[in-house]
Image: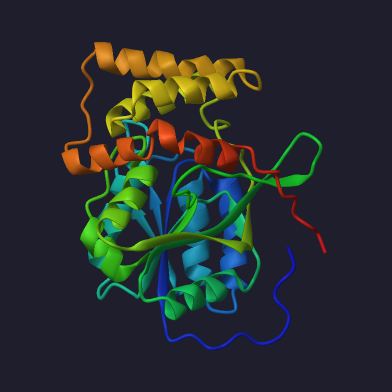
Amino acid sequence: MAPTSGKLNATTLAYAVVTPVRDEAVNLARLAACLAAQTLRPASWVIVDTGSTDGTQGVVADLAREHRWVRLAEIDGRGLERGAPIVRAFHSVLPALTPLPDVIIKLDADISMDPDHFERLLLEFEGDSRLGIAGGAGYEAREDGVWRRRYGTGPSVWGACRAYRRECLNQILPLEEHMGWDTLDLLKAELRGWDVRVIDELPFRHHRPEGMRDGRRLRTYMMQGRGAYYMGYRISYLAIRTLFRLPRSPAAIGLMFGYAHARVSRSPRCLDAELRAYVRSHQQLRRLPLRAREALRPRAELSEN
């Protein structure tokens, strides 16, 4: 990724970064270098440890000694549903960011980006007062070593690197402490009248493909199926989504198993009925051609120049 040439227009907006972590000692050094090199540095970077055992806290302590804008926070993330530690970590530090900056960024530890990434992102917010949530285009390295873009369907700002305008975040809090939180917050923002946008010209790298932490692809899909049940997915839509993925990943059958297990065990669902109905409205049959086009887009590659 090459930084933009020339000087950017100055932005008057300020931002803070929140990074929930668990056993991220290796990745944090790379991310810290990226943030330190930003043309516009964050007002603060809060790293929230959710139960590391690999020396992560020592890495953060070293970073805090080197940079005054870095600090460590801790929560107990043990025994929580997948996704809950991330959201709880994010919630836990917001009261300490007083006053809240103009933009709050939830950023995973396994991300890297160009030096002008966040300055360019803030300029997007400054240029559109209705922009509530935004993020760049995420790329992952495949087996051939080429960085290819990862696409989503519908509102698809990736939760790994996501920026919230302060006023929008205040309207959609609290976020759901459950798998699927990073879809529900986008839809909740839309329901409140905010725009949600992926900035195609703003790439970032994701250094750990989805599911690597969980170890087994089937387990990852099953957790996604449980998340689909929590969000109120149409079972017909989930079945079509499963069939679409099966030729490339037989483990995708776990989507249906996870959903069925959640349903049989009467797992909790999102309590916001309006939000669940909005999720289902995006899954109507008439929208399937659009969703198919989104899923079948050619995978853009990231130039190293």
Task: Please provide percent x and percent y for residue 175.
Answer: 27, 49
Against 300, residue 130 (above or below) is: below
Report the residue at 47% width, 16% height from top. Answer: 254
On the picture, is 122 further left or further right than 72?
right
Position of the N terminus, as image quadrant, is bottom right
Quarter holding residue 217 = top right
In this rendering, the count of numbered labels is 0
Q: Give residue 4's quadrant in the image.
A: bottom right
Question: Can you name the residue that lies furthest to the front here?
Answer: 286
- Tell me residue 296's x, y (percent): 63, 37
- How has the structure been colored for display? rainbow
Residue 43 can be seen in this image: no
User: Which of the 4 image quadrants contains residue 203?
Assistant: bottom right
* Residue at 36 percent of width and 19 percent of height: 259
At 22% from the left and 35% from the top, the residue drawn is: 270
Pick the front one: 255 or 73: 255
Residue 234 lies left or right of residue 126; in this view the side is left
| Horizontal side, residue 218 vs residue 287: left or right | right
Quick one: which residue is furthest to the top in this view? 264
Q: Residue at x 66, y 67 (%)?
A: 114
Where is residue 100 shown, x and y percent of the image?
28, 72
**Residue situated in front as seen by the camera: 243 or 59:** 243
* Whether residue 31 is visible: yes
